[in-house]
Amino acid sequence: MAEFIDLRSDTVTRPTAGMREAMATAEVGDDVYGEDPTVAALEAEVAALFGHEAALFAPSGSMANQIALQLVVPPGDELLCDADAHVVTYEIGAAAAYGGISSRTWPAVGADVDPEVVAGMVRPDGYFAVPTRAIAVEQTHNRGGGGVIPLATLRELRRVADGHGLALHCDGARIWHAHVADGVPLAEYGALFDTLSVCLSKGLGAPVGSLVVGSAEKIARARFVRKRMGGGMRQVGILAAAGRYALAHHVERLAEDHAKAARLAEAVAPHGVLATVVRTNIVPLDLTKHPLDAPALAAAARERGLLISVLGPRTARLVTHMDVSDAQIDDAVEILARLLRA
């Protein structure tokens, strides 16, 4: 059988030839001692992109998020986020398990966050009340179909945070997509947040790696938290080199993935299964009113050489990325149209 068309996630990409060359020739040292020059260069570059003082390389987005949350929420205190946020949905309770953090959520609305709702949830210090210490948002929003939180909304959330003395964290695993979709400079996003986590191994195509971004003081603390979580790494410049290559070559090309996702959205929309307007590289499918449920659609698609993600009994997802060609998108459109017509 021909190679599968893999639309399960943008994490399935493989390093390009140029990226492999950058990895093979990377200058390295022991990063636990702070002696890996390629890691240091990557950290400085990412910090500068977001207008912050420092950054810290971590092996995964989940670890980067959890390090950041421990920087802004003391044990026993509270984080506010949405009910579908990655930090409380896909990180297997790490905020509570590692940071002793209590989480409370507003209803899942993807990128359509209402700052007034968030403001109404804030709990101040008081008698036996768990005080709110931080707000977390996701840009772009994974389970929200790759939705982009508008800059105006983020500014309002910053005002809410400042008004209550709270920190504001961004799970920016796919913030590069938001930057390309809306044209908002990365530094403008960075100025709104106390901490960010940004991922190199999704749409940017690096094999491994995320970074925590923040002040010099926070990142100094973050190094201890990373070590405590088992994230101290040695000659990791080999991986940091992949990240630097991705930043140099793969950010602006994300527009190509957005165009491919728009083609998929156009193909599935007539069948009444498109869950939301598609802005970036994620196409969410709502099969509530379709004869096929999500597992059945995924199984049928697999038989025809197409891989898609099942997120729930009636929820599926398509994600475009750099390893999917235009010709493969043509084939995926044909496969999906045939299955959804049935």
Image: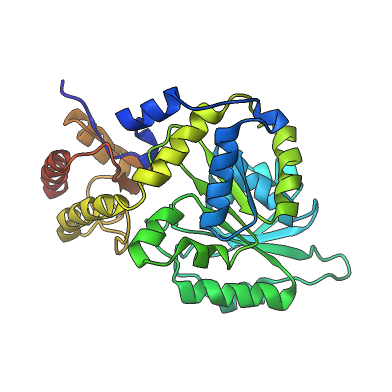
Query: How many numbered discs sit on the rendered protein?
Result: 0
Q: Closer to the camera, 50 or 91?
A: 50
Query: Residue 269 at what x, y percent from top left?
Result: 19, 59
Q: Closer to the camera, 204 or 135?
A: 204
Q: Residue at x 79, y 65 (%)?
A: 131
* In the rendered image, the vertical position of residue 241 relative to residue 93, given as above or below: above
Colour pattern of the rendering: rainbow
Residue at the extreme top of the image, as rendered: 1
Q: Residue at x 69, y 37 (%)?
A: 226
Q: Residue at x 31, y 38 (%)?
A: 295
Residue 67 visible, this angle: yes
Position of 332 with respect to 220 (left or right) is left
* Quadrant showing the N terminus: top left
Q: Residue at x 66, y 42 (%)?
A: 94
Position of 222 with respect to 268 (left or right) is right
Query: Residue 14 at what x, y percent from top left?
Result: 35, 30
Query: Residue 302 at what x, y percent from top left?
Result: 23, 31
Occupied quadrant, residue 274? bottom left
* In the rendered image, the vertical position of residue 151 relative to residue 8, given as above or below: below
Residue 197 visible, this angle: no
Position of 277 with respect to 149 (left or right) is left
Occupied quadrant, residue 163? bottom right
Query: Residue 217 at what x, y percent from top left?
Result: 75, 53
Position of 113 with respect to 277 (left or right) is right
* Quadrant showing the C terminus: top left
